[in-house]
Amino acid sequence: MNAHLGRAAVAVAASAITVSLAACGSGEETDGRPGSANGDAIKVGLLLPENQTARYEKFDKPLIEKQVAGLTRSKGEVIYANAKQDAAVQNSQVDMMITKKVNVLIIDAVDSKAIAGSVKKAKEAGIPVVAYDRLAEGPIDAYTSFDNEDVGKVQGNALLDALGDKPKDGQIVMMNGSVTDPNAKLFKSGAHFVLDGKVNVGKEYDTVEWKPENANTNMAAALSALGKGKVIGVYSANDGMAGGIITALKAAGVTPLPPVTGQDAELAGVQRIVAGEQYMTVYKRYAPEATAAAEMAVALAKGERIDGIINQMVDSPTTKRVPSVLVPGIALTKSNVKSTVVDDGVYTVAEICTDKLKSACEEIGLK
């Protein structure tokens, strides 16, 4: 995945509402079959994977609902379900959406392989499928996510910047995401591309279900095996795991804390950055991703083309040349908290700067 292609996604997705799509179908009222042109009165099934990560309920769901409403003159309906990290539940939710005769599905898969059969069932029912955030297997029609290999590179480069000229005899720990998430493989690949040959990787883990408690256990084991004085940095694939890692570092009495990376710009992660406990996170502007998903879903539901929305083609293990929109991530550190999540309205200064963080916030100009 090329970073320069990903950069084009922000402009493409942000301007997508104004793009005039060339229609394959007439857009007139039809017999209401799933996936057929149905005017603006369409049903969009939205399946998100879990609610442990704050982003899905706080950002993705409301953003997609808002975009669908805007694109359908408030006639479109979003039918929502959250799988709570259970792939079997998500497969049942696809069945439910087929029964409800939705016109299109947006699926953020719990398990990219396990969802393939359900994607096939949806397609057989005439329902187009947009893979959201994770590249689901099966006959998907479109895909939108972040440029995930580039995210890993952003994390790796930030960690190298933080390490500076630290001695080469120190070691880093790599805490990758879940093997059931295809994005985790891409984050890992991007990070290795940057880090290999420049630092020594003492221990590396694929963290079951991305759970902070599993990252905490893994980090404790790494410190026991390597020695707490030898760990000079930690690559963490997301903020939730970074929290578990930092707890383990503190419990082991590691001072000062080594630089720890993250991703998702969760409030707790941003607060740890302000406090000096976490070095960075990858801030991903969810609006362009949600906009692209809604644009593609509405167009597919109406039988329209999506050529004017996509910015590249992506291959999944089962489907070649999937029309896609990829969006780049941004390294967020103490230096740009205000110009990213605050200026974009993701968090207010009051939300970030609790009483405990008042002085730390003032030091970086957050008032």
Image: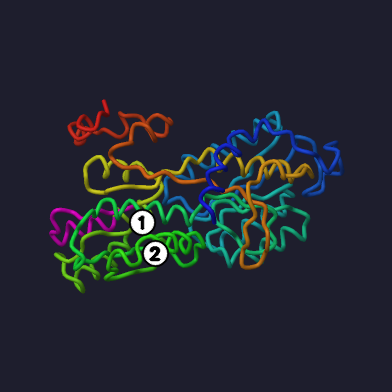
Q: In which quadrant is the N terminus drawn?
A: bottom right
Amino acid type assigned to the residue bearing label 1 in the image? Gly
Q: Are marks 1 and 2 in contact (CB under 8 Å)?
A: yes
| Placement of 343 over or under 104, stated as above or below | above
- For image coordinates 29% across by 37% down, the residue present is 335
Element class at badge 1: helix
The alpha-carbon separation of the residues under discs 1 and 2 comes to 8 Å
Q: Residue at x 75, y 34 (%)?
A: 40
Indicate which disc, 1 or 2, sits on the residue closer to the N terminus: 1
Label annotation for residue 1: none
| Crowd rating for badge 2 (residues with CA inside 10 Å; few <14, some 14–19, many 20+) | some
Residue that appears at 71% across and 33% down: 72
In reply to whether residue 245 is colored magenta, the answer given is yes
Q: Amino acid at mark 2?
A: His
Left or right relative to 344: residue 350? left
Is the residue 173 above or below the residue 323 in the image? below
Residue 20 image position (x, y, % from top left): 74, 33
Residue stretch rendered in magenta on the structure: 244-261
Foreground of the two, 173 or 271: 173
Quadrant of the image for the C terminus? top left
Quadrant of the rendered image containing residue 94:
bottom right
Residue pointed to by mark 1: 156
Q: Position of residue 62 (x, y in %)?
A: 54, 37
Give the x, y percent position of residue 348. 35, 29
- Residue 99 quadrant: bottom right
Pointer 2 residue:
192
